[in-house]
Amino acid sequence: MRSRTQRAWDRVAAYLPVLLMGLLALGSWWLVRNAPSVPSGAAQVAVTHEPDYFMHHFSVKSFAADGSLLSEVRGDMGRHYPDTDTLEIDRMRLRSVDAEGRLTHASSERALSNADGSEVQLFGDARVVRDAAAGPGSATQPQLSFEGEYLHVWPQLERVRSNRPVRLTRGKDHFSAENLEYDHRAQILQMQGKVRGTLMPKNSGKNPR
């Protein structure tokens, strides 16, 4: 009797470590599944397209590394959207100075600008004017202006684009098109759709040559 009991106990003793390990693993699994979740303090709220601050009758300036003014954006009301890091502006006015000191002005009923003002979209009564300036030698570059209901402007890159009707004026010359792309640095102007233009004759001047 004792030998049978001893043999049975020996078998149980042999499997007991395995059973204990299994119960321990099962208990750990159960605790993990049923333990209450701990809220994480690092959890972030989903960012929505809602303004996080407003500005009234404001001015935002951008400067070069040497401290010179690159651009200034002014408006009646500004709304900053953190999800896109953009600034929406009511009655926007922009003034930009390029590396050669030439001035570009822009205005519109509403505008959407990126963080540093290097890219601006103009909506409603949009206008961009590049002032007349001295060109190579004694030549003078005439004033250049763009007008329309929508203009996409890169002031520092000297580019203007629009997929809506645009009026372009260069000195006394006038053009209109259904869409336009202008790159001043590359001296490329592309106008598409119903393009119309009026070229005024240049003055011959007093020099007969």
Image: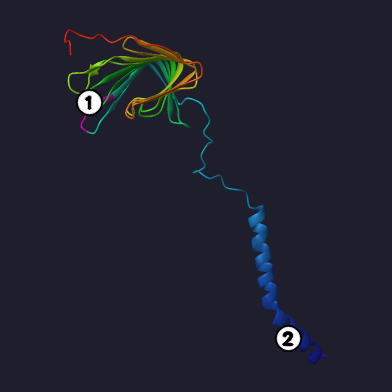
Residue at point 77%, 88% (across, down) = 7
Q: Which residue is mark 2?
A: 10
| Magenta stretch bounds | 66-70
**Mark 1 vs 2, N-terminal side:** 2
Image location of residue 183, percent across then percent down: 37, 27
Residue at point 67%, 63% (across, down) = 27
Residue 39, compared with residue 16, is above or below; it is above
143 left or right, relative to 33: left
Instruction: Point out the residue furthest to the right here.
Output: 1
- Residue 106 on the magenta segment: no
Image location of residue 33, percent across then percent down: 66, 55
Instruction: Point out the residue furthest to the front here.
Output: 209
Q: At numbered mark 2, what does the secondary structure look like: helix, strand or loop?
A: helix
Q: CA distance from mark 1 to mark 2?
A: 97 Å
Residue 64, compared with residue 147, is above or below; it is below
Image location of residue 204, percent across then percent down: 23, 9
Of 140 and 6, the residue lying toward us: 140
Q: Which residue is mark 1?
A: 100
In the drawing, what numbered circle is on residue 114?
none
* Neighbour tally class for label 2: few under 14, some 14-19, many 20 plus, Cα within 10 Å: few
206 left or right, relative to 150: left
Callout 1 amino acid: Glu
Residue at point 52%, 28% (across, down) = 49
* Neighbour tally class for label 1: few under 14, some 14-19, many 20 plus, Cα within 10 Å: few
Q: Quadrant of the C terminus?
A: top left
One can see residue 12 in this view: yes
